[in-house]
């Protein structure tokens, strides 16, 4: 039984590591959200530029 209880006791060093992992996971999640937002903004800019170019140039017909 002592071994089973010992598995549930967490050393302060382990708590600090777990806390650091949680902070890093949170930071990664924020950065992933920022990347997704920047990609969406980039795609919107590209779409606007393509529409503008399509409106400026006459269509080639053959």
Image (cartoon, helix red, strand yellow):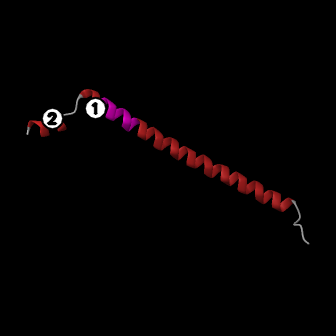
At horizontal 42% and vertical 40% (from top left) the residue drawn is 25
Residue 10, image x, y percentages:
22, 33
Which quadrant of the figure contains the C terminus?
bottom right
Residue 49, image x, y percentages:
76, 54
Residue 4, image x, y percentages:
13, 40
- Judge left or right: residue 56 versus residue 49: right
Task: Classify 46 as above or below 22.
Answer: below
At horizontal 37% and vertical 36% (from top left) the residue drawn is 21
Residue 15 image label: 1
Task: Classify 9 as above or below 34.
Answer: above
Q: Which residue is mark 2?
A: 6
Residue 17, image x, y percentages:
33, 31
Q: Nearer the viewer, mark 2 or mark 1?
A: 2
Secondary structure, magenta segment, majority class: helix
Q: CA distance from mark 2 to mark 1?
A: 15 Å
Which quadrant of the figure contains the N terminus?
top left
Residue 26's quadrant in the figure? top left
Task: Classify 3 as above or below 33.
Answer: above
At horizontal 83% and vertical 62% (from top left) the residue drawn is 55
- Start-end of magenta stretch: 14-23
Of all residues, the one furthest to the top in this rendering is 13
Dot 2 or dot 1, earlier in sequence = 2
Task: Classify 36 as above or below 51.
Answer: above
Q: Nearer the viewer, residue 12 or 55?
A: 12
- For mark 2, give the secondary structure: helix
Q: Is residue 26 magenta?
A: no
Q: Is residue 16 magenta?
A: yes
């Amino acid at each position: 039984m002592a071994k089973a209880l010992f598995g549930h006791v967490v050393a302060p060093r382990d708590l600090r590591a777990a806390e650091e992992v949680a902070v890093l996971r949170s930071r990664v999640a924020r950065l992933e959200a920022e990347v997704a937002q920047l990609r969406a903004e980039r795609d919107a800019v590209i779409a606007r530029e393509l529409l503008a170019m399509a409106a400026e140039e006459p269509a080639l017909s053959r």
